[in-house]
Image (cartoon, helix red, strand yellow):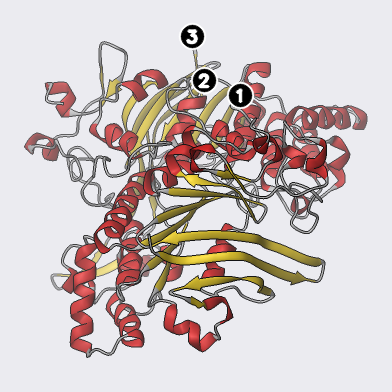
C-alpha cells in the first residue's frame, strides 16, 4: 500500500518558564492512502498537539524540535508558513471539536466556503458555488442553495459540524484530521456524523486521522488505533485486535474502565492515580507509577514499541517477555 | 420500597421574552404583546424510591438538568407538586426549605465552575457543616471534614489548598465531599462525570457507588451517557423535549427498549468493537422547546409516526413488565 503520510520520531516541545514540556515524544506513525487511523488518549496525552503539529498549527511556545513528517515525499515539518498554506486546507484539512467556534459567526456559510475554494483553487466564483453545493449535498444538508446564504447561528449543532465537514471536503483533500469532531454533540448526532465521515472516507478514498478520547467511537470507525499516553504511543495495532486483545496495561485499564453495556450494577475497574505532569515525568516508563504489573527496570528505562503477535505493537517490558 | 421523592405533574417554563418593550410586536397592523416561553419541563411525574439510583437520560436541551434543579428547589415549578417523604416542598419559603437542604444535596457537572476559587478546600467543606449545625465545636467540624475527605479519597492534609491546585477528578471528589458533609439522604447528581476523562470517570463512579452503599443514599443521576447510566442505575427515565417518554428498570430498558426514541438512542451508542453505519437514523433535529410540536413531541423524527401521533399527546401506560411508555404505537401494538 502507498504511504500517505509518515511521521518519524516526531517531537513537540513547549518551552515554558517552569521548564520544557515534551507534549509529543518520539512518535512514529504511518498512514496509508485511504486508511483510517484513530488516536486515543486522555486529556493531556498530547493527541491534539500531535494532530495540530501535522499541519504546523502549533502556537508558541510550542515547536517541533525533532523528527520528520513525510507527506507525498516531502518533509512538511520543515516547511515555512507560506509553504504550509499550500498544504493546509488543500491536501490536508482539519475538523475541530466545536463547530460553533470554528465557523465565523458574522459571515454566511457560502462566503466561508467560497473563501476556502478561492484560496486554493483557480476557479471562478460561479464554479466555486457549484462545488459548495455539491459538497453540501454530500453531507446531506437539505436545500443547500438556501442554506448557503445563512449564518452559522441559524444551524443546529449537528448541521454546523456537517458544514465544517463540507468545508474540509471542498478541495478534495487526501487526508482529514478530525480532532474530537463529535465531543460537543449529542449521541444521536454523533452517530450521524461518524456514519457520514466513514461514508465520505470510503467514497472519496480519503485518509482519516480521528483524534478522540472515546475508544468505542474509534473502534467503530477506524481500522487502526494508536493509544497515546503522556506524549508517547504506548500501543498501536489493528482496531479489532486492540479492543479484543489489548496488550499494554494502560490500554487494558482503559478498556476495563469503560462501563460495558449489559454489565449490570457493579464496581468498575479503575486505573489508580492520574497521568503524571508533563513537567515532571518519571525517568522510566511514563505509566509505571500507575501500573499494577511494573518491573524493576520500568522505573529506570523507557520501553520502546515492540512488535507482538496479532499485528500490534506495545511499549511495555512486560509484553516483551510474552506476558 | 417507599418513595423518598415524588414529582407530580411538574411543569417548569422559562419566560425569555425580555422587557415590556421587547415583547411588543406589530402584526397585521396592530401592536401585540407576545411572550416567548421555553417549556423546559412538561407534565413530569416520577417517583424516586429510597435507596435507589434513578437515572434521567436525554440529549442536551431535553430538560433533564432543569428537572434536577426544580427538584432541588433551585427553580420553583410553574405547576405540579414535589413531595419529599410525603411532605410538599415545592411551595415552601427558603427559610422553611432549609431543613431539607441538609437532607437533599446536589453535585454539579463542572468541578471547575462549582467550587469557589477564592476559598480553600477546608473553607468550602466547613461552610455547610457550620451553617447547618451551628452547635458543633471547631474540633467537631474539623473532624467531620477530615472524615469525609478521607472517604472521598482526598488527603485531609490538602485541606488548606485552593481548588485550582487540584485536578478535575480530585475537584469532583471535593464537590462530592461538599454534598456528603451534611449527611444527606438524597443527592441529585447533574452529569457528575461528563467533564472527566475515562479512567477518572471510573474512579468517580465507583466513589458514588461506594458512598451509596455506606450511607444508604438515594441518587437522582442526570446523564447523557447511556453506558454510564446502565452501569450505575436501578431505573432509568428517558426524556425528550421536557417529557418522559419511557421509564423502566435499567435491565428492561437496555435489553428491551419500547419507545422508538429509546431505541434510536440505544442504537446510537458507539460500542467497543462494534460496526459503524448500522445506527437507527433519526430524521431532522430536536425541535425547539419554545414551540412544542402538537401531539407526541417526538412525532417529527419518529419513523413510526402516524396521523394520531401528530394530533394527540400520548399518555403514559404501564406495560406488563412494569415499563412505563408514552407512545401511541406501543399502545396500539404497532411497534
Whether residue B115 sits left or right of residue A174 in the image: it is right
Percent across and percent down for residue A268 are 59, 27
> For the residue carrying disc 3, how many other residues have a C-alpha within 10 Å: few (<14), some (14-19), or many (20+)?
few
Identity of the residue drawn at 32% across and 37% down = B265
Q: Nearer the viewer, mark 3 or mark 2?
A: 2
> For the residue carrying disc 2, how many other residues have a C-alpha within 10 Å: few (<14), some (14-19), or many (20+)?
some
Of A230 and A6, which appears nearest the observer?
Answer: A6
Give the residue pinned by disc 3.
Answer: B1
- The answer to whether marks 3 and 2 mark residues whose Cβ atoms lie closer than 8 Å is no
Of A11 and A14, which appears nearest the observer?
Answer: A11
Q: Which mark is residue B272?
A: none
Percent across and percent down for residue B47 are 43, 21
Q: Which mark is residue B209?
A: 1
- The answer to whether marks 1 and 3 mark residues whose Cβ atoms lie closer than 8 Å is no
Q: Secondary structure at mark 2?
A: loop
Identity of the residue drawn at 61% across and 34% down = A253
Give the residue pinned by disc 2.
Answer: A265
Whether residue B324 sits left or right of residue A211 in the image: it is left
Q: Nearer the viewer, mark 1 or mark 3?
A: 1
Q: Nearer the viewer, mark 1 or mark 2?
A: 2
Q: Chain of mark 1?
A: B
- The answer to whether marks 1 and 2 mark residues whose Cβ atoms lie closer than 8 Å is yes
Amino acid at each position: 500500500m502507498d504511504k500517505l503520510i509518515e511521521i518519524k520520531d516526531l517531537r513537540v516541545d513547549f518551552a515554558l518558564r517552569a521548564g520544557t514540556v515534551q507534549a509529543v515524544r518520539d512518535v512514529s506513525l504511518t498512514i496509508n492512502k485511504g486508511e483510517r487511523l484513530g488516536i486515543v488518549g486522555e486529556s493531556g496525552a498530547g493527541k491534539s498537539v500531535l494532530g495540530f503539529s501535522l499541519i504546523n498549527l502549533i502556537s508558541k511556545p510550542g515547536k517541533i524540535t525533532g523528527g520528520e513528517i513525510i507527506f507525498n515525499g516531502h518533509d512538511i515539518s520543515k516547511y515555512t508558513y507560506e509553504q504550509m498554506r499550500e498544504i493546509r486546507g488543500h491536501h490536508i484539512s482539519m475538523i475541530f471539536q466545536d463547530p460553533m467556534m470554528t465557523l465565523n459567526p458574522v459571515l454566511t456559510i457560502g462566503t466561508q466556503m467560497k473563501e476556502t475554494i478561492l484560496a486554493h483553487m483557480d476557479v471562478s466564483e460561479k464554479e466555486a458555488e457549484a462545488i459548495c453545493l455539491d459538497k453540501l449535498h454530500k453531507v446531506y444538508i437539505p436545500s443547500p442553495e438556501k442554506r448557503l446564504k445563512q449564518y452559522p447561528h441559524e444551524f443546529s449543532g449537528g448541521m454546523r459540524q456537517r458544514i465544517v465537514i463540507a468545508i474540509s471536503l471542498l478541495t478534495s483533500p487526501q487526508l482529514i484530521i478530525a480532532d474530537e469532531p463529535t465531543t460537543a454533540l449529542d449521541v444521536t448526532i454523533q452517530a450521524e456524523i461518524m456514519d457520514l465521515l466513514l461514508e465520505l472516507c470510503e467514497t472519496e478514498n480519503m485518509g482519516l486521522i480521528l483524534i478522540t478520547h472515546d475508544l468505542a467511537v474509534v473502534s467503530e470507525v477506524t481500522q487502526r488505533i494508536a493509544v497515546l499516553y503522556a506524549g508517547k504511543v504506548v500501543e498501536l495495532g489493528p482496531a479489532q485486535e486492540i479492543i479484543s486483545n489489548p496488550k499494554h496495561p494502560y490500554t487494558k485499564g482503559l478498556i476495563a474502565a469503560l462501563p460495558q453495556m449489559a454489565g449490570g450494577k457493579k464496581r468498575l475497574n479503575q486505573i489508580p492515580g492520574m497521568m503524571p505532569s508533563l513537567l515532571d515525568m518519571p525517568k522510566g516508563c511514563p505509566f509505571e507509577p500507575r501500573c499494577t504489573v511494573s518491573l524493576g527496570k520500568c522505573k529506570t528505562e523507557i520501553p520502546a514499541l515492540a512488535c507482538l503477535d496479532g499485528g500490534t505493537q506495545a511499549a511495555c517490558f512486560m509484553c516483551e517477555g510474552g506476558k | 420500597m417507599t418513595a423518598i421523592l415524588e414529582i407530580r405533574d411538574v411543569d417548569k417554563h422559562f419566560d425569555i421574552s425580555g422587557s415590556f418593550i421587547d415583547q411588543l410586536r406589530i402584526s397585521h397592523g396592530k401592536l401585540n404583546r407576545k411572550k416567548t416561553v421555553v417549556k423546559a419541563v412538561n407534565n413530569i411525574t416520577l417517583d424516586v424510591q429510597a435507596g435507589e439510583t434513578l437515572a434521567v437520560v436525554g440529549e442536551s436541551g431535553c430538560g433533564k438538568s432543569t428537572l434536577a434543579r426544580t427538584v432541588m428547589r433551585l427553580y420553583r415549578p410553574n405547576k405540579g407538586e414535589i413531595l419529599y417523604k410525603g411532605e410538599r416542598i415545592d411551595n415552601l419559603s427558603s427559610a422553611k426549605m432549609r431543613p431539607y437542604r441538609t437532607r437533599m444535596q446536589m453535585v454539579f457537572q463542572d468541578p471547575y465552575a462549582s467550587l469557589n476559587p477564592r476559598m480553600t478546600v477546608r473553607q468550602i467543606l466547613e461552610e455547610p457543616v457550620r451553617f447547618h449545625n451551628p452547635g458543633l465545636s471547631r474540633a467537631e467540624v474539623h473532624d467531620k471534614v477530615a472524615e469525609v475527605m478521607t472517604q472521598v479519597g482526598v488527603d485531609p492534609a490538602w485541606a488548606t489548598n485552593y481548588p485550582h491546585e487540584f485536578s478535575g477528578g480530585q475537584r469532583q471528589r471535593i464537590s462530592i465531599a461538599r454534598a456528603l458533609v451534611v449527611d444527606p439522604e438524597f443527592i441529585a447528581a447533574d452529569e457528575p462525570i461528563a467533564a472527566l476523562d475515562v479512567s477518572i470517570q471510573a474512579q468517580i463512579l465507583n466513589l458514588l457507588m461506594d458512598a451509596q452503599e455506606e450511607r444508604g443514599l438515594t441518587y437522582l443521576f442526570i446523564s447523557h451517557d447511556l453506558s454510564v447510566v446502565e452501569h450505575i442505575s436501578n431505573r432509568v427515565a428517558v426524556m425528550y423535549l421536557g417529557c418522559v417518554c419511557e421509564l423502566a428498570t435499567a435491565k428492561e430498558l437496555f435489553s428491551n427498549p419500547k419507545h422508538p426514541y429509546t431505541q434510536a438512542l440505544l442504537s446510537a451508542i458507539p460500542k467497543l468493537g462494534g460496526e459503524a453505519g448500522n445506527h437507527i437514523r433519526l430524521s431532522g433535529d430536536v425541535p425547539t422547546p419554545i414551540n412544542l410540536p402538537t401531539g407526541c413531541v417526538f412525532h417529527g423524527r419518529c419513523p413510526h409516526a402516524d396521523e394520531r401521533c401528530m394530533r394527540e399527546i400520548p399518555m403514559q401506560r404501564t406495560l406488563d413488565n412494569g415499563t412505563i411508555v408514552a407512545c401511541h404505537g406501543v399502545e396500539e401494538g404497532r411497534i
